[in-house]
Image (tube, coloured by chain):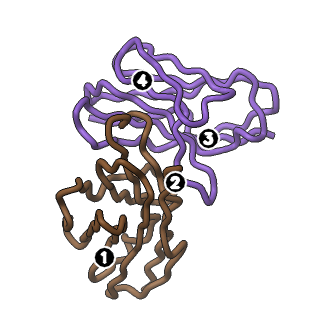
Amino acid sequence: KNQVEQSPQSLIILEGKNCTLQCNYTVSPFSNLRWYKQDTGRGPVSLTIMTFSENTKSNGRYTATLDADTKQSSLHITASQLSDSASYICVVSALDTGRRALTFGSGTRLQVQP
Amino acid sequence: NAGVTQTPKFQVLKTGQSMTLQCAQDMNHNSMYWYRQDPGMGLRLIYYSASEGTTDKGEVPNGYNVSRLNKREFSLRLESAAPSQTSVYFCASKVSGSYEQYFGPGTRLTVT
């Protein structure tokens, strides 16, 4: 069964600090991996999308890494801001049956404190 | 350009009542999706529509029906609501050939 596990479930950091969120998956055959940011009461918004051949992708202060061999990804947030407080969701897509085959992690809830 | 819009934002139903959740997108996307999000779980696909006139079941379709009214609109209907359908419902859309899905703001539904 395709699964996406994220850790930690929740995290509290001080403003200005860095943090790294983890995502492990068992989805096969792999197509792409996405990180979404979901603010409270809002829909998810895409941060990055990586395919098999990409192992690093940045979007401002967000940097995602992908190791397709170990089936792990991380999202690194640099110099955190209060506005980074949100849930971060890892989503993995399988090949071919893409319409049905998005597997969502349950998210990491990040709280940035002043 | 509003993106993906959903109505209503909040709804409380009694067990057995019916209702329709509305979704519209103005990005000329072909594909549209309905998900539910429950505490401690990832989003789960209820139904999707790859193009106007087609709909298919997702992971958790029981208790729901959908209508792709036209290219812009994709509605989700609960014929007889149950407490297990208490959830936050998200609509999403994407253009064919792209990985990127765009989500609406969600509808928070409570069934008592």
Mark 1 neighbour class, 10 Å CA radius: few under 14, some 14 to 19, many 20 or more: many
Residue type pointed to by label 1: Ile
Instruction: Determine which of the numbered discs, if any, sits on residue A77 in the image.
Output: 1
Which chain is assigned purple? B
Front position in the image: B36 or A66: A66
Q: CA distance from mark 3 to mark 1?
A: 32 Å
Q: Residue at x 24, y 56 (%)?
A: A50
Q: Nearer the viewer, residue A56 or B3?
A: A56
Q: Of label 4 and label 3, which has the lower sequence position? A: 3
Q: CA distance from mark 4 to mark 3?
A: 24 Å
**Secondary structure at numbered mark 2:** loop
* Mark 3 Cα shell of 10 Å, populated few (<14), some (14-19), many (≥20): few
Q: Which mark identifies residue B49? A: 4
In the image, the chain rendered in brown is A
Label 2 to label 1, Cα distance in Å? 22 Å
Q: How far is the residue under mark 1 from the one under mark 4?
A: 35 Å
Mark carried by residue B10 = 3
Q: Which mark is residue A41?
A: 2
Q: Nearer the viewer, mark 1 or mark 4?
A: 4
Tell me where residue A18 sits by quadrant.
Answer: bottom left
Is A78 situated left or right of A111 in this image? Answer: left
Q: Name the secondary structure under disc 1.
A: strand
Q: Is residue B97 left or right of residue A108?
A: left
